[in-house]
Image: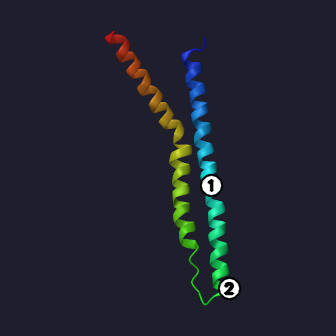
Amino acid sequence: MVTTDEYKRAEREVLLREARRGWTIHLAVYALVNAGLIALNLVLVTTTDASFIWFPFPLTGWGIGLTGHYFWGVRGADREITERQDATERRAESLRSAA
């Protein structure tokens, strides 16, 4: 039989792993897509009359989103998990006392 503390600890580990995995996938997609955009922009500048270097804009904009995902989705995940587990415990207590 699993104790409540063991369950909470295991749930925390699973949720933190999922948060890190989500951010890692986001980072990989960011790197691949932006590498393609950089290459596209540089090819267009060197092979056509285009002279505007625009790739820093999506790089920066998406980078801000990626940074936010890291701080709120990975570093803040532990706090959110604790809040959710505490809320679940309070609800379970209220259901037990109502019964």
Answer few, some or many: residues within 10 Å of disc 2's Cα (few below 14, many 20 plus, some between 14 and 19): few
**Which secondary structure lies at badge 1?**
helix
**Mark 1 and mark 2 residues within 8 Å of each other at the beta carbon:** no
| Mark with earlier residue (1, 2) | 1
Q: Nearer the viewer, mark 1 or mark 2?
A: 2
Q: Quadrant of the N terminus?
A: top right
> How far apart, in angstroms, are the residues tagged by discs 1 and 2?
28 Å
Residue drawn at (56%, 19%), measured in percent from left and top?
Answer: 5
The percent coordinates of residue 90 (x first, y second) are: 39, 22
Residue wearing tag 1: 27
Q: What amino acid is found at the position of numbered circle 2 in the picture?
A: Thr
Farthest residue, direction front: 48
The percent coordinates of residue 67 (x first, y second) are: 55, 55
Residue drawn at (63%, 44%), measured in percent from left and top?
Answer: 21
Q: Is residue 93 left or right of residue 3?
A: left
Marking on residue 55: none
**Which secondary structure lies at badge 2?**
helix
Q: What amino acid is found at the position of numbered circle 1 in the picture?
A: Leu
The percent coordinates of residue 35 (x first, y second) are: 66, 67
Q: Is residue 89 left or right of residue 75?
A: left
Colour scheme of the picture: rainbow
Q: Is residue 57 above or below residue 47?
A: above
- Quadrant of residue 95 in the image? top left
The percent coordinates of residue 28 (x first, y second) are: 65, 55
Residue drawn at (44%, 26%), measured in percent from left and top?
Answer: 86
Farthest residue, direction top: 99
- Quadrant of residue 38 in the image? bottom right
Q: Is residue 57 left or right of residue 37?
A: left
Residue wearing tag 2: 46
Q: Quadrant of the C terminus?
A: top left
